[in-house]
Amino acid sequence: MASQRILLAVALLTQSPALLAHPGIGIVMDDRGNVYYTDLEQVWRITPEGERTVAVPDVHTHQLYLDAAGALHGQHEWYEEATDTWGYYVWRLGRDGELRKTVPDVQGNNTLVRDPAGNTYWSSRTGEGVRVMVTDTAGWDRQLTRHRFRDIRWMHWSTDRNTLLVVDHLQVKEVGAGGAVTTIGDGLKEEGPSFGGVADRHYVFGTWTDRVGSVYVAVYGAGKVRRIDRAGRMTTVYTAPEGWSPCGGLVAPDGALWVMEFSQGNRTRVMRVG
């Protein structure tokens, strides 16, 4: 895979309002080869032929999730200034095109980090740090691990590794069987100014995996995608051009790397790279 050269640029750009604090990480591919991604104003669909259309309009979602039936799930979040609270609902787009709410309007926040069995993973801050919690399909909550994290930014369930990947401040950690936690990505911060001057807590964004279990990390603050193989070796597989930085991505069944990027002008684009 060429690490610096774009082999196929889909050049799909959308404009986002200047008030957005940071980009989303939501990008997924269904079993028909359609790619879905968020620009925080709507969710876009790219067909295998390269046609781009709006799949879900007027939704502010940072994450996306595909269930076993191929239905797409996302959120809509909004800030209620009068009460200084966040509201949300969760929506589902079926294969038949039906769009409906699965969680109605409520205050608070929700997670779309789910495993194939339907268990949901979320974080909870305590005086001792941040815990990772899991809600099973019966609605019961429990701690996934006794490990206390520093500052959980993002989480991703990897079906390729059958583990939970956690972006904890500037590190990527893996929660495995029995709650064992391993740091698999460290030293991600580079010398020099960060992209757009982002703080450390926004330096590392989305994670994803390929079929052999390598972990990919969108190092937003450095403008790079790093790959960590099963042996722990870390390499740079993509470097964004000036003014852009990766925030998410995926590896397709054919091995192609797709990267979602955000610009300093608050634009979102998706490209298929080597």
Image (cartoon, rainbow, N blue to C red):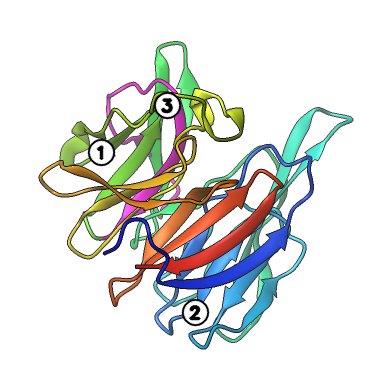
Camera-side mark, 1 or 2: 2
Mark 2 is surrounded, within 10 Å at the Cα level, by few (under 14), some (14 to 19) or many (20 or more) other residues, namely some
Q: CA distance from mark 1 to mark 3?
A: 15 Å
Q: Amino acid at mark 1?
A: Val
The answer to whether 29 is drawn above or below residue 158 in the figure is: below
Q: Earlier in the sequence, mark 3 or mark 2?
A: 2
Q: CA distance from mark 1 to mark 2?
A: 30 Å
Q: Amino acid at mark 3?
A: His
In the depicted view, which residue is nearer to us: 271 or 2?
2
Q: Which residues are magenta?
A: 138-159
Q: Earlier in the sequence, mark 1 or mark 3?
A: 3
- The residue under label 3 is 169
The answer to whether 57 is drawn above or below residue 167 in the figure is: below
Q: Is residue 214 visible?
A: yes
- The residue under label 1 is 175
- The residue under label 2 is 34
Mark 1 is surrounded, within 10 Å at the Cα level, by few (under 14), some (14 to 19) or many (20 or more) other residues, namely many
Q: Is residue 63 visible?
A: no
In the depicted view, which residue is nearer to us: 17 or 59?
17
The N terminus lies in quadrant:
bottom left
Q: Residue at x 22, y 35 (%)?
A: 179
Q: Is residue 163 magenta?
A: no
Q: Could you tell me which secondary element the residue under label 3 belongs to?
A: loop
The C terminus lies in quadrant:
bottom left
**Mark seen at residue 242:** none
Q: Are marks 1 and 3 in contact (CB under 8 Å)?
A: no
Residue 198, x across and y down, in percent: 57, 29
Camera-side mark, 1 or 3: 3
